[in-house]
Image (cartoon, grey):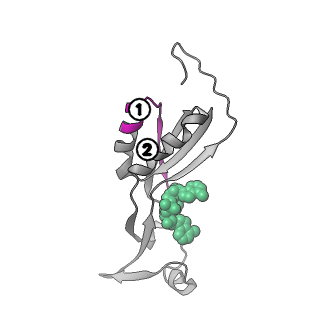
Amino acid sequence: MKILLAVLQTEDAKKIIGKLNKEGYKVTKMNSTGGFLNAGNVTLLLGVPAENVEHVIDIIKADSRTRTKSVSTAAMPYVVSSASIGIDGMIPFNIDSGSLSVDVKVGGATIFVLENVNLAALGISDAV
Ligand code: 2BA
């Protein structure tokens, strides 16, 4: 048994969860927030037999798009001065109708695979 934690974009989550369920995988969906953009995303928790990990990753990969998001620096809680982003050269910014925004590429998905996990299922149905 392995645990997969998959951080998805909200726009992709419904379709991916549907496909995973259709293939018989049990999924826990958690609403999460990216630490950088401070925008909502979706984290899936899956307990998966080791031999199925690649299959699950393939399903997620198939519907995880890369998107460019334009984000106001005001949404980034750690930015002390908006202008410092450009000065540091970390990411480019543009001034759009008076407000400061940055273009950031997000996705497809970020997947963590945790090894050697024990699953205790307390209930009447089989765990996997
Ligand atoms: P966020 O942390 O909101 O990051 C959104 C996107 O911003 C990232 O897309 C990346 O392109 C960019 N980004 C993040 N941190 C950056 C930084 N310090 N400097 C410059 N650009 C940065 P993705 O890499 O596709 O990540 C999407 C979401 O997946 C992240 O949202 C976060 O919630 C999660 N994630 C990605 N890598 C992670 C990691 N190593 N550990 C935990 N969560 C991660």
Q: Which residue is mark 2?
A: 59
Chain-order first, disc 2 or disc 1 = 1
Q: Could you tell me residue 32's position as x and y percent?
A: 48, 49
Mark sitting on residue 84 = none
Could you say which quadrant of the image residue 68 lies in? Answer: bottom left
Q: Amino acid at mark 1?
A: Glu
Q: Which residue is mark 1?
A: 23
Q: Amino acid at mark 2?
A: Ile
Could you say which quadrant of the image residue 107 lies in? Answer: bottom left
Q: Secondary structure at mark 2?
A: helix
Neighbours of disc 2 within 10 Å: few (<14), some (14-19), many (20+): some
Tell me if residue 58 can be seen.
yes
Q: Is 119 inside the magenta-drawn segment? A: no
Q: Could you tell me residue 64's position as x and y percent?
A: 41, 53
**First to last magenta residue range:** 19-36
Which residue is at 40% across, 62% downward?
66
Q: Could you tell me residue 93's position as x and y percent?
A: 43, 81
Which residue is at 68% across, 40% downward?
115
19 vs 71: above or below: above
Q: Residue furthest left?
A: 97
| Ligand 1 closer than 8 Å to label 1 CB | no
Which residue is at 39% across, 82% downward?
94
Q: Quadrant of the N terminus?
A: top right
Q: Are marks 2 and 1 in contact (CB under 8 Å)?
A: yes
50 vs 104: above or below: above
30 vs 123: above or below: below
Nearer the observer, 72 or 102: 102
